[in-house]
Image (cartoon, grey):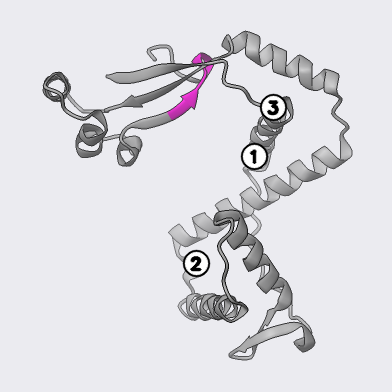
């Protein structure tokens, strides 16, 4: 069962649209890259803001943490002391992971590969954009083609995935009685979108299977 509504002419900039398109292509191309992440190189002690068990935390790491926080929570401020303490805690946890050789845990190794592939694909995208000039005409042509194929329309849908028709009928009965779709999805759906109340996000007609 599905609950959806139309979003007319959802506007995106042409540049953002093409960047997303290129990113998807490059992610696919980089999927087979399996090289593990190597340890960080040693740094000059004069560049250290803290030392943890003989391992230095660099000023660059501190700057990156500040940037990470600003991107995640714009306007939020932390003292340098708190930021350094956060980096120390991360370093201690990293040392613990090495102590127990957690990098060889199958689930951890899988996550490392995924993060490596994501980083490599993003780097490949930046390199592509730096070495390939994209004209406004090319952007407009691609944008117009996508709008034509999709009719300029997108849909937002929620669904509740259940195993049997009887289960579906029971949920429909609850909905007919005024039950909340999101709550019923969270409590009954067997799909991965259950935690989000069955939310499948925005999509064009071409992105979904024919039954949708």
Q: CA distance from mark 1 to mark 2?
A: 24 Å
Q: Quadrant of the N terminus?
A: top left
Q: Which mark is residue 176?
A: none
Q: Residues within 10 Å of mark 3 (few under 14, many from 20)?
A: few
Which SS class for mark 3? loop
Asked whether disc 1 touches disc 2, contact meaning CB atoms under 8 Å apart, the reply is no
Q: Which mark is residue 27?
A: 1
Earlier sequence position, callout 1 versus callout 2:
1
Q: Residues within 10 Å of mark 2 (few under 14, many from 20)?
A: few
Asked whether disc 2 touches disc 3, contact meaning CB atoms under 8 Å apart, the reply is no
Residue 24 x, y percent position in the rendering: 64, 34
Residue 117 x, y percent position in the rendering: 63, 49
Q: Does the magenta segment cover residue 205?
A: yes
Earlier sequence position, callout 2 versus callout 3:
3
Report the residue at 38% width, 23% height from top: 157
Label 1 or label 3, whichever lies nearer to me, is 3
Q: Does the magenta segment cover residue 6?
A: no
Residue 169 x, y percent position in the rendering: 13, 19
Report the residue at 76% width, 88% height from top: 45
Earlier sequence position, callout 1 versus callout 3:
3
Q: Residues within 10 Å of mark 1 (few under 14, many from 20)?
A: some
Instruction: Report which residue position mark 3 lands on.
Output: 13
Horizontal side of 75 relative to 178 (left or right) equals: right
Instruction: Report which residue position mark 2 lands on.
Output: 104
Label 2 or label 3, whichever lies nearer to me, is 3
Which SS class for mark 1? helix
Q: Which residues are magenta?
A: 201-206
Which SS class for mark 2? helix
Q: CA distance from mark 2 to mark 3?
A: 43 Å
Report the residue at 27% width, 28% height from top: 160
Residue 96 x, y percent position in the rendering: 48, 79
């Amino acid at each position: 069962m599905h609950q959806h509504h139309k979003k007319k002419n959802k506007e995106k900039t042409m540049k953002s649209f093409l960047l997303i398109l290129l990113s998807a292509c490059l992610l696919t191309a980089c999927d087979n890259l399996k090289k593990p992440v190597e340890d960080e190189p040693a740094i000059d002690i004069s560049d250290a803001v803290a030392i943890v068990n003989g391992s230095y935390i660099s000023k660059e790491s501190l700057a990156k943490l500040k940037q990470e926080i600003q991107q995640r929570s714009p306007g939020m401020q932390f003292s340098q002391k708190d930021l350094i303490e956060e980096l120390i805690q991360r370093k201690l946890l990293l040392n613990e992971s090495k102590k127990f050789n957690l990098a060889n845990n199958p689930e951890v190794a899988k996550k490392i590969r995924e993060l490596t592939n994501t980083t490599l694909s993003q780097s490949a995208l930046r390199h592509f954009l730096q070495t390939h000039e994209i004209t406004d005409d090319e952007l407009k042509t691609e944008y117009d083609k996508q709008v034509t194929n999709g009719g300029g329309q997108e849909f937002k849908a929620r669904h509740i995935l259940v195993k049997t028709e009887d289960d579906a009928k029971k949920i429909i009965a609850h909905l007919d009685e005024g039950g909340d779709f999101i709550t019923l999805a969270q409590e009954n759906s067997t799909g991965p979108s259950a935690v989000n109340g069955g939310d499948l996000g925005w999509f064009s007609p071409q992105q979904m299977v024919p039954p949708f």
